[in-house]
Amino acid sequence: MDQIVDEVWARLNAGANAGNERSPFTMLQVATIALDGAPAVRTVVLRRVSRERRSVMFHTDVRSTKVSELRRDPRVSLVGCDLDGGIQIRLHGVARIVETPSDTRAVWDSSRPRTLIVYRTPLAPATPVASPAEAHATTLAEDPDSSAGFENFCLIDVTVSSIDYLDLNPAGHRRASLVFEEGEWRGTWVAP
Ligand SMILES: Cc1cc2nc3c(=O)[nH]c(=O)nc-3n(C[C@H](O)[C@H](O)[C@H](O)COP(=O)(O)O)c2cc1C
């Protein structure tokens, strides 16, 4: 079971350190509980992983719906899939919204400028627009100020408490249920 824990974190780590190369776990889907209690899911880019802290992080806009949802209920579920390898990793945990400038500034400064453009629009995500061009006009504007939009930028830091690992290997499917208890990952095989 220790091998499975190692594999999960190695795969997530590869996802977060993808650089210019695609890695199956670079994009994850994150599920929250919407304000009306319905499930809500969307794709995000996995930015940082820390096995020691049991943490996975992504970047988002503080004005986005998901942030409002997480302020109300910080429980999240994330899923990623390696289609070629037939591996699915599901994570459950609690999200912390990291928005204090002292915690976000270094990440903002080290991010590639093109990834920060989205934070520079005055239009909050989901604001109705007459046409897509109306949003482009503000988002794509060249802004000489590298701090522009910083106030809209935040990190979501998820502390993972349980993991569901599924391997659809043709030689035999395997599924493991991992829970972090008393300072360690404890796992059991379960029927796929
Ligand atoms: C490939 C891809 C990567 C994305 N990465 C992010 C991301 O890292 N952070 C983010 O907030 N939204 C990202 N999005 C957009 C979200 O999926 C979503 O549409 C947006 O954040 C609004 O979600 P919300 O209304 O649930 O807050 C990405 C979308 C795609 C298609």
Image (cartoon, rainbow, N blue to C red):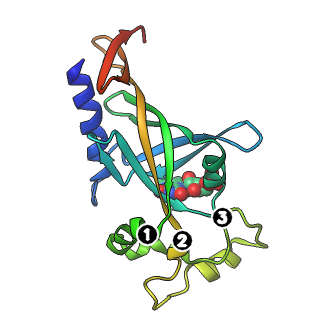
Q: Residue at x 32, y 71 (%)?
A: 110
For marks 2 and 1, give the CA distance: 7 Å
- Pointer 2: what residue? 118
Q: How many marks?
A: 3
For marks 1 and 3, give the CA distance: 15 Å
**Where residue 108 sits in the image (x, y, percent)?**
39, 71
Q: In the shown orientation, is residue 179 left or right of residue 131? A: left
Kindly identify the amino acid type of the residue bearing the numbered disc 3.
Pro
Kindly identify the amino acid type of the residue bearing the numbered disc 1.
Thr
Q: Nearer the viewer, residue 35 or 7?
A: 35
The local crowd at label 1, few if under 14, some if 14 to 19, many if 20 or more residues have their Cα within 10 Å, is few
Q: Which numbered disc, 1 or 3, marks the residue that appears first in the sequence?
A: 1
Q: In the shown orientation, is residue 52 left or right of residue 140? A: left
The local crowd at label 2, few if under 14, some if 14 to 19, many if 20 or more residues have their Cα within 10 Å, is many
The label number, if any, that marks residue 115 in the structure image: 1
Q: Nearer the viewer, residue 180 or 5?
A: 180
Kindly identify the amino acid type of the residue bearing the numbered disc 2.
Val
> Helix or strand or loop: what does disc 2 sit on?
helix
Camera sees residue 173: no
The answer as to whether callout 3 falls within 8 Å of ligand 1 is yes
User: In the image as oriented, which residue stretches furthest toward the bottom?
Assistant: 144
Q: In the shown orientation, is residue 178 left or right of residue 7? A: right
* Contact flag, marks 2 and 1 (Cβ < 8 Å): yes
Q: Quadrant of the N terminus?
A: top left
* 154 up-or-down from 101: above or below: above
* Contact flag, marks 1 and 3 (Cβ < 8 Å): no
- Pointer 3: what residue? 125
Q: Which numbered disc, 3 or 2, marks the residue that appears first in the sequence?
A: 2
Q: Quadrant of residue 136?
A: bottom right
Q: Quadrant of ligand 1?
A: bottom right
> Helix or strand or loop: what does disc 3 sit on?
loop
* 155 up-or-down from 120: above or below: above
